[in-house]
Image: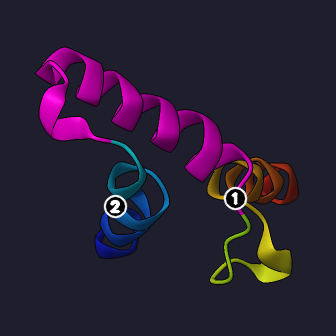
Amino acid sequence: MPETSASLKKEKLYRIRTEQMPMAQVKSIVFRYIMTYYNRRRIYTANPGGLPPAAYRQAARGLAA
């Protein structure tokens, strides 16, 4: 998960002032980033076709069936 961590920091956390937010709010931002953007929309170069992780898993399940 090192790539996720680096992407999360560069694309989200370094752009907002998290040091002034409650921990629950920061956790919510991280969760939404991973579950909505990173897993569902972001182009992922390690997967064939550049599919996001969620789309790649769904396509792989379709091929296995």
Magenta residue check for 38: yes
Residue 19 higher or lower than 26, as above or below: below
Residue 25 higher or lower than 17, as above or below: above
Nearer mark to the viewer, of 2 and 1: 2
Region of the chain picked out in magenta, as a range: 17-42
- Quarter of the picture containing the N terminus is bottom left
The answer to whether residue 3 is left or right of residue 35 is: left
Which residue is at a point 28% across and 41% down the rendered structure image?
17
The residue where tag 1 is placed is 42
Number of labelled discs? 2
The answer to whether residue 2 is left or right of residue 56 is: left
**Crowding at label 1, few (<14), some or many (≥20) Cα neighbours within 10 Å?**
some
Q: Which amino acid does label 2 sit on?
A: Lys
Q: Which colour scheme is used?
A: rainbow
Q: Position of residue 50 (x, y in %)?
A: 79, 75
**Crowding at label 2, few (<14), some or many (≥20) Cα neighbours within 10 Å?**
few
The image quarter in which residue 49 lies: bottom right
**Mark 2–mark 1 distance (CA, rounded to whole Å):** 15 Å
Q: Find numbered disc 1 in the image and state the secondary structure of the residue it sits on.
A: loop
Which residue is at a point 63% across and 44% down the rendered structure image?
37
Q: Where is residue 65 in the image (x, y as percent from the top left)?
A: 83, 48
Q: What residue type is labelled 1?
A: Arg
Which residue is at a point 36% across and 37% down the rendered structure image?
30
> Is 43 or 65 nearer to us in this picture?
43
The residue where tag 2 is placed is 9
Q: Where is residue 16 in the image (x, y as percent from the top left)?
A: 37, 43
